[in-house]
Image: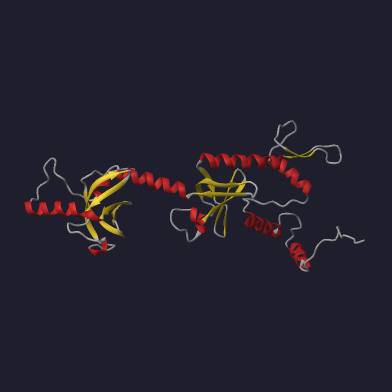
Amino acid sequence: MRNIPFNIPPATGREPEYLAKAIANHKLCGDGPFTKQCHQWLEERTGAPKALLTTSGTSALEMAALLCNVQPGDEVQAMVLRRDDGQGNILLSRADAADVLAWDRLKELQDSGEVLDVVVKGIVNGGAIAYVEGVRGFIPASRLALEFVEDTEVFLNKPIQVRVIEVDKAKKRLVLSAREILRERAEVEKRNKISNIQVGFVTEGTVESLQPYGAFVELGNGVSGLVHISQICEKRIRKPSEVLNVGDKVKVKVIAIKDGKLSLSIKEASDLMAKEVEEESFELPESGEEATTSLGALFANIKL
């Protein structure tokens, strides 16, 4: 028969040193530097907003009841763990019931796509930690912002809006994302800007990318449009790179707006400019004529 030393405390060999420090600090109760170090260790590794050590399990239960403001006569939701705890009592768990309800609520939030306000409580490898319904959620670094996030530490203790994108109760896995919300807002902002642009508008832009079918031109204020290969110049070309380079400044004319996207033409803008030169006119255009201006001037007095 083997004896199990229940009452023999585990030791690492440095306990006398720690005890000497505790005595020297005049802190033998539970609010000394060692307790604070343990609090910090637990908070960093669990992502909990606050950790609190107690002197016993009974004290922990009493503290939990006080924090939950549970009073005699209160109705609470609980889960039955055992019909008989060996002493004729039904063993209940309020925490387990809350856990079940929390995961059910998280599934509802995922299905509804509701936008949630959370605070980043921890930074871990590959992302950040935030809590929803008391459940620890993971926000991948790729979903913290629209662009790549090099330093996730800047999000620590900062508020952020997220959606629930993955709920796995069995694996206790909750994944959150801010990227979709940011993308939707950027799209709305872009559409609002485009709604203030009219067909026939002429401005200068910068070639931001070349594709086999045309060139994308950035007009400023986060707005860009496509110049189809047939709208680049009068002569027939096989690919845009024959006459354009990324970074080139070009005059473009808006020839169509559909589904929040701009169709541009360098060819028509060039034709318009050539016509203006031929007329050698420096007067303001008559009613019905096309005018040229800058996109910055167009947006100058527009509040989005």
**x then y, percent, for residue 124:** 57, 58
Q: Nearer the viewer, residue 101 or 131?
A: 101
Please state the horizontal and vertical placement of residue 265, each as a whole percent of the image. 22, 52
Question: Where, by quadrant of the figure, is residue 205 drawn?
Answer: bottom left
Give the quarter of the figure containing the C terminus.
top left
> Which residue ends up furthest to the right in the rendered image?
1
- Quadrant where the N terminus is found in the figure: bottom right
Which residue is located at x 70 percent, y 42 percent?
Answer: 96
Count of number-bearing discs:
0
Q: Estimate the x, y position of residue 298 in percent, counting from the top left.
A: 25, 46
Q: Residue at x 17, y 59 (%)?
A: 235
Q: Is residue 203 left or right of residue 35?
A: left
Q: Image check: 42 left or right of 293? A: right
Q: Kindly give the residue lying farthest to the top in the view shown.
A: 73
> Where does the image place residue 158, in percent across and percent down from the top left?
51, 51
Location of residue 241 (image quadrant): bottom left
Residue drawn at point x = 79 percent, y = 65 percent: 11
Q: Colour scheme used in the picture?
A: secondary structure
